[in-house]
Amino acid sequence: MAAAYDRQVTTEPPLRADAQRNRERILAAARELFREQGTAVALDDIARRAGVGAGTLYRRFPDRDALVRQVIVDGFEICLAAVEGARAEPADPAVALERLFLRVLEQRERLVLPLIGGPVVREPRIQELQHAIRDTVEDILVRARSAGVVRDDITPEDLITAAAMVCRPMPHLPDEMSAALAARHVAVYLHGLRPEGARPLPAAAPAPGDFGRHVAMDAEQRSR
Amino acid sequence: MAAAYDRQVTTEPPLRADAQRNRERILAAARELFREQGTAVALDDIARRAGVGAGTLYRRFPDRDALVRQVIVDGFEICLAAVEGARAEPADPAVALERLFLRVLEQRERLVLPLIGGPVVREPRIQELQHAIRDTVEDILVRARSAGVVRDDITPEDLITAAAMVCRPMPHLPDEMSAALAARHVAVYLHGLRPEGARPLPAAAPAPGDFGRHVAMDAEQRSR
DNA sequence: CATCAAGTGGAGAATTTTCTCCGGTTAAGT
DNA sequence: ACTTAACCGGAGAAAATTCTCCACTTGATG
């Protein structure tokens, strides 16, 4: 999936085949370890799990931030693909909403979206992806809303938050079990989205613009 | 809240007043930083944020695990209190279920339950608390179920998972916003718990016994 | 199949984090 | 007020992690 297009769009010479393979192994190992232990894991551990030397890791990703950023970008990329996949499938609006969550849930293991401790979110590429995701979700949501299958005080941010929450790792449970719990949770949440008998929500929805803009101000003491 | 009873029950001499104060400051700082950055943050950072010397931290908590464990135990303790509070309030079963989530949600900021990367969950004290929480939740759930206000394929584990998910930190959003989103999510989820029009859930519920028992086997490479 | 730029691993220097120790301070008892 | 045992902070030794460098290997190209 994350093939060549996720490198700089500028004219860099393409990677050699073995280098490309190692790069992907590193990203896969990083993804796993970030989900298991957070983004502060020792980089040498990542290199070890990826089966490459430390030098190889540092050559490809000059510092921790570069690696974290790439893993997160990949996550958003995967997420966007899932969401657009859901929109593309012909289905009535209620089913589309369900598909949205199912598609994202399928990618659970590969998503490292939310344990950001720094200004990574400001990256233009990431904001771009976030907006694209938001717009796609909004599209699905609007259709569902006008078909009357979803209560109309729900915003795209609600759905995105819900999806992000169920995708986060539960490192103390085996994968199979946490997948089952996540799927059950989504089913209940989806059922709760329907307008029948809805009572007003307890808090106002954050404005769309506010969403990506807030980042921890303590940029000096993040990571290590 | 976390007063004297959370130290060893064995006959240790009580801490001096200043020591007790420092101990609490350390735990509060640890709680914050664990939520912001994960349990791998530098211990000296915790000492700094707590406003105590490094020596003070290490005197009170011999290593990272001891500190993590205590923060987690505190979290479960707070959680149990919230849950029991909800059970104690006289309310009809539907409201009790709602209260359950509200009480837990109120404590969001102080809960560091789920980013465990090691065998901390095996601690007898923690298992004890987990069981007490489960039993209390089950009690509320059973009453709600027999009042017919909740679909009957929902288990205590579902509710606990749901609560854990909404309590997890969203470090890229300001507190106020993540609190609002969490509250909205819970409202929708609660609505979805009602039996009217329920379709079968997509996966089997994990057996109650399995829940606390699974822990990452890679005990050697956890933390650092 | 020869050439060679690109890529590799891992030793070890540089940096950061952990953790100990002790001279000075303070709460608590009398 | 005075005594004293508990406690404190922070300097710095010890351990761990980060990151560089280079002799060796390998994939691509003609």
Image (spheres, coloured by chain):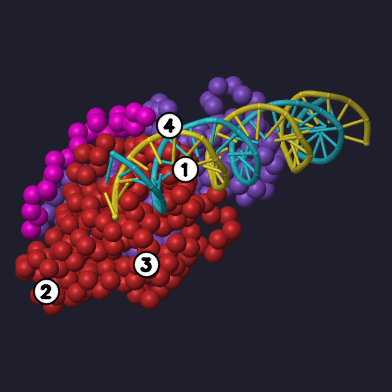
Chain colours: A purple, B red, C yellow, D cyan
The residue sitting at 59% across, 58% down in the picture is B220
Residue occupied by mark 2: B148
Residue occupied by mark 4: A221
Is residue B142 located in the magenta-colored stretch of the structure? no
The residue sitting at 19% across, 71% down in the picture is B141
In the rendering, at what x and y percent does residue B9 appear? 35, 67
Counting residues from the start of the chain, the first of labels 3 and 1 encountered is 3
Res. A36 visible in picture: no
In the rendering, at what x and y percent does residue B104 appear? 21, 57
Is residue A212 located in the magenta-colored stretch of the structure? yes
In the rendered structure, are the residues bearing label 4 and label 3 in contact, judged by CB atoms less than 8 Å apart?
no
- Which sits in the foreground, D18 or D5? D5
Q: Secondary structure at mark 3?
A: loop
The residue sitting at 32% across, 45% down in the picture is B18
- Which sits in the foreground, A156 or B61? B61
- Which sits in the foreground, A120 or B80? B80
Residue occupied by mark 3: B11
Residue B95 occupies quadrant: bottom left
Residue A17 occupies quadrant: top right
